[in-house]
Amino acid sequence: MKKRFTIKRVIILLSLVLVYSAALNYIRVLAESTVLSDITFDSDSASALSDKEDEDAAVAESLCEEAAEVAMYYESPIEKAGIDSYEIFAPITTEVTAVTTVSETTEAVTTTTPPQTSATTAGTTTQATTVATTTVTTTTEATTEEDVEIDDDEDVDIDDEDETADASEDKSSDSSTLESLWYSISSSGTVDTNAADNLNNGKSYKDDTVTVYDSSSGRYVTDNAFDIVCQVTYSEVGTSMEEETIKAQAVAVYTYIKYYEAKGEYASVSLKSGVPDKIIECVEAVDGLAMYYDGEYILAVYCAATAGVTCSSENVWGGDRDYLQSVVSEYDFLDTDNYGRVTTYTAEELKKKIESKTNITLSDNYQNWIQILSYTDGGYVGNIAIDGNTTAKVSGTERTLTAYVFRTYILNIRSTCFTVSYSNGVFTFVTYGYGHGVGMSQEGANLYAIYGGYSFDQILHHYYTGVTIA
């Protein structure tokens, strides 16, 4: 007999389904609860985790601080005095202050200041502030191809018939002759031009073979002048400067090489291979050009930057040259790497440098170690005294102690335009410019191209007075 679905049977079936569903739901909830309990921390575990997180954060912070210190060390940040604290030392308006004598007594903090310009408030003393007890390295190294690469200046050979450096130094050390060293300089806003220039002379450096001494490799190199000029120009100013600046540098390089060649000597330059197109194109634009004075190649020296005024050759090496006179370099104060650069030495460091380079034995009177006796054109330091000595045996030769001798042979500071102060065992030098300061300022030339709109020939006429370009 067939079973029939009755109401009773339907109810029983539905009841079984509901019980089965409820059981399944209960099992699911129980399983979820078990899983959650497995991953839920008690209060002690949560506290431990929080402590671990704090410890990890502290370690991370410490590592970040150490990394920052390492990065700061390798970046070697340059300490600089504020530009507003130090005026441009322009001889147009400069008055020579009283000359410091060796016998003067000094205060606990001895500060030497260059002649004050008319813009300086009366009674204001320019004083460098000691910022650290470690020495700031003053040697620049090229880091990328685009960096401006400038070799520091070397001794410049002056003709035998010129006055000697010592004669010039003796002249500048006499306070009665200081004012005669300031040159009457025309406004830097005017540009010297020369109708005798021949900027399209049809010559080419490629037709000239020259030999130079490559100071970077220590060997003599003979090649066509075009390739040599390209390599030297690239080494000197890189590719980051204005095209007119690069052109001016190229003409100066060729002239410098030919000057020494005419003397039967070899110019010492620095060559750099891999010359980029920008340099080649700039050299091509001035191909064949050189600077002349009275029909002869000039000593076309140049430096990285100045203190706002260039130096005459007479007051650096001796030997007056009409085309190497002191002129205003209007924009050099914008060169933040070299204008107002602060370098510090501990007394022990300075003592070691002086005594190792000279025959001077320093006393314990620190304030008497460095005294500025006179200034030359542009506010550059002339003669100095080292612990009362105005002469010393330097590099095996008895020399008058000038700022040039001090900078070149003893301390290697960036410029002979500087202030020096002593406080709490630390000597602080603030320098303005980079190099000997004679001839063309490379940074100044670039700034004239940027802000003054100067062409390469205008730049050259500005820095080398009375020359002809042809």
Image (cartoon, rainbow, N blue to C red):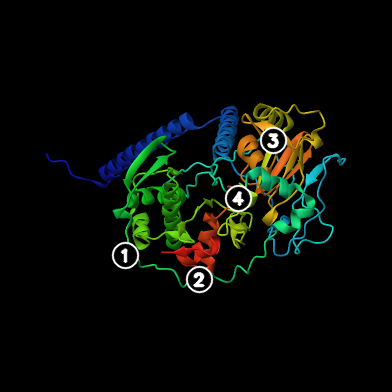
**In the rendered structure, which disc, 2 or 1, sits on the residue that comes first in sequence?**
2
Residue type, label 4? Gly
Task: Please identify the quarter of the rendering in which residue 246 is found.
Answer: bottom left
Above or below 202: residue 47:
above
**In the rendered structure, which disc, 2 or 4, sits on the residue that comes first in sequence?**
2
* Quadrant, the C terminus: bottom left
Inter-mark Cα distance, 2 to 1: 21 Å
Describe the element under mark 2 as helix, strand or loop.
loop
Report which residue position mark 3 lands on.
345
Above or below 54: residue 301:
below
Report which residue position mark 4 lands on.
319
Inter-mark Cα distance, 4 to 1: 34 Å
Mark 2 in CB contact with mark 1 (< 8 angstroms):
no
Describe the element under mark 1 as helix, strand or loop.
loop
Inter-mark Cα distance, 2 to 3: 46 Å
**In the rendered structure, which disc, 3 or 4, sits on the residue that comes first in sequence?**
4
* Quadrant, the N terminus: top left
- Disc 3: CA contacts within 10 A as few (<14), some (14-19) or many (>=20): many
Residue type, label 3? Tyr
Residue type, label 1? Gly
Report x, y in % for residue 303: 54, 51
Tell which residue pokes out farthest to the left in this image.
1
Inter-mark Cα distance, 2 to 4: 26 Å
Q: Please name which of the two marks, 2 or 4, marks the residue nearer to the observer.
A: 4
Mark 2 in CB contact with mark 3 (< 8 angstroms):
no
Report x, y in % for residue 338: 60, 50
Residue type, label 2? Thr
Mark 2 in CB contact with mark 4 (< 8 angstroms):
no
Describe the element under mark 3 as helix, strand or loop.
strand
